[in-house]
Amino acid sequence: MTRYPAYIITLALIFTDTPAAASAWVMAEGETKVSLSHEANDLQYRQSLPSSGAPMSVSRKARQDSLQINVEYGLSDKWTLTGKGFESTLQIDATSYDEWQVAVGLRRDAPILQSSLMPPFLYRLIEGLCQDCQLHRDRVASLELTGRYDQQSARADNTDLGLMLSLADKVLINRFSVMQQIQWASGGDQFQQWHKWSYRFEVGLGAQWQIGQVSEAFWDRPSDYANLSHGYYVEWRQPVSHMSLVLLIGSKRDSSQPHAFDSAKLEWRKMF
């Protein structure tokens, strides 16, 4: 396998292995949330070829398509059971590499860890400027333990455990809202460890629209640099049917190479 296809496979698998950004909130007892998503990652690059004469290079393409289902169920007001199923195909020229993955987790509300992520003066400033507004602040914290098994055609099967801390701070002003969320996760197996952080900022416009950005950094080997992903999203909600659609556009980049995937994701969510 040549150097660049091997790198592309590694990059795709790195971001496949990255735990998806989850919510910091636990589900209400008896409630279920289901989400289905399709993600497409595209990359075009040029590869240099050995030549006895003038340098030669060819244009190559890589594409990764993945389908994912996530389920969350409220066992109680403190505990949420989570599950994920994932299937992905990476194609480089005419060669394909497949993967599937399953994961289960248990999320616990952790109010003792709640923290203020908004500037300390922001809420008081809003109260002073908008005395007739309906204000509400929601600060949450949770811990989630996950177990995962994945099978890949490009490398050995893998099973690992991970622990994630999530903190969120949301301010609602009438029908407008501002939210920040941070997450830190760490895990692995006896052979390899990984660490991840993510940051999400979101603005809500009424009951139907949310726009925001999400950034993630992921380490799975000793390095001063992380594997990075960044994207912007828009979410449309239908409050009556408890359904929403999310479109995310962004990029994913490995720490050791200049190439980056262009990424697009469409997700459907439903509350039951």
Image: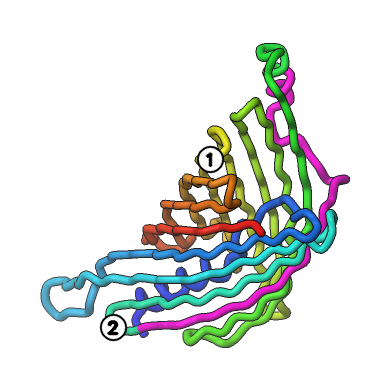
Which amino acid is tagged 1? Gln
The mark closer to the camera, 1 or 2, is 1
Q: Residue 213: image x %, image y %?
A: 51, 44
Q: Is residue 102 magenta?
A: yes
| Badge 1: residue crowd in 10 Å (few <14, some 14–19, many ≥20) | few
Q: Residue 165: image x %, image y %?
A: 75, 54
- Choose between 105 and 259: the one closer to the eye: 105
The answer to the question of whether label 1 and label 2 lie on touching residues, with beta carbons closer than 8 A, is: no
Q: Residue at x 60, y 80 (%)?
A: 150
Q: Secondary structure at mark 2?
A: loop
Give the residue pinned by disc 1: 208
Q: Residue at x 64, y 26 (%)?
A: 174
Q: Is residue 78 magenta?
A: no
Q: Is residue 184 left or right of residue 238?
A: right
Give the residue pinned by disc 2: 94
Q: Residue at x 54, y 80 (%)?
A: 100
Q: How many marks?
A: 2
Q: Which contiguous range is marked in magenta?
A: 96-124
